[in-house]
Image (spheres, rainbow, N blue to C red):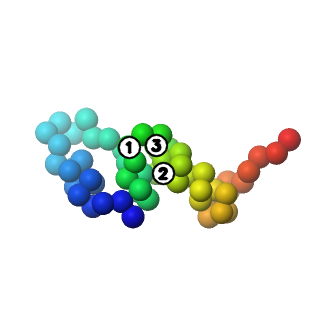
């Protein structure tokens, strides 16, 4: 779980348009996937474990 202080700091910003989206699991601000609320690294881990419904590894 990400630190709570990172999320509270984002909410107290002077300009609300500058709020950065952060991963729910680790708090990483970059590589954020809005649809899932996760960063690319956490998304890949959870998808490979089968914990994200409707997402599966592609093969062709």
Is residue 8 among what the camera can see? yes
Secondary structure found at label 3 = strand
Tell whether 46 sits left or right of 5. right
> In which quarter of the view is residue 45 placed?
bottom right
Secondary structure found at label 1 = loop
Which numbered disc flags the more N-terminal residue, 3 or 2? 3
Pointer 3: residues within 10 angstroms few (<14), some, or many (20+)?
Answer: many
Secondary structure found at label 2 = strand
Pointer 2: residues within 10 angstroms few (<14), some, or many (20+)?
Answer: many
Cα–Cα gap, marks 3 and 2: 6 Å
Which numbered disc flags the more N-terminal residue, 1 or 2? 1
Residue under numbered circle 2:
38
Residue under numbered circle 1:
29
At a point 44% along the width and 59% down the height, the residue shown is 25
- The percent position of residue 57, horizontal first and vertical second, equals 74, 51
Mark 3 touching mark 2, by CB under 8 A?
yes
Pointer 1: residues within 10 angstroms few (<14), some, or many (20+)?
Answer: few
- The percent position of residue 10, horizontal first and vertical second, equals 24, 47
Cα–Cα gap, marks 1 and 2: 9 Å
Mark 3 touching mark 1, by CB under 8 A?
yes
Please identify the quadrant where the C terminus is shown. Answer: top right
At a point 46% along the width and 43% down the height, the residue shown is 32
Tell whether 28 sits left or right of 8. right
Residue in the foreground of this view, choosing between 30 and 8: 30
- The percent position of residue 8, horizontal first and vertical second, equals 22, 55
Please identify the quadrant where the N terminus is shown. Answer: bottom left
- The percent position of residue 7, horizontal first and vertical second, equals 27, 54
Is residue 53 among what the camera can see? no
Cα–Cα gap, marks 3 and 1: 6 Å
Residue under numbered circle 3:
32
Tell whether 27 sits left or right of 7. right
> In which quarter of the view is residue 50 placed?
bottom right
């Amino acid at each position: 779980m990400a630190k709570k202080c990172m999320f509270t700091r984002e909410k107290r910003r002077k300009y609300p348009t500058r709020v950065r989206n952060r991963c729910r699991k680790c708090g990483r601000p970059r590589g954020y996937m809005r649809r899932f609320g996760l960063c690319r690294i956490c998304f890949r881990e959870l998808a490979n474990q089968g914990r994200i419904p409707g997402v599966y590894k592609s093969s062709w």
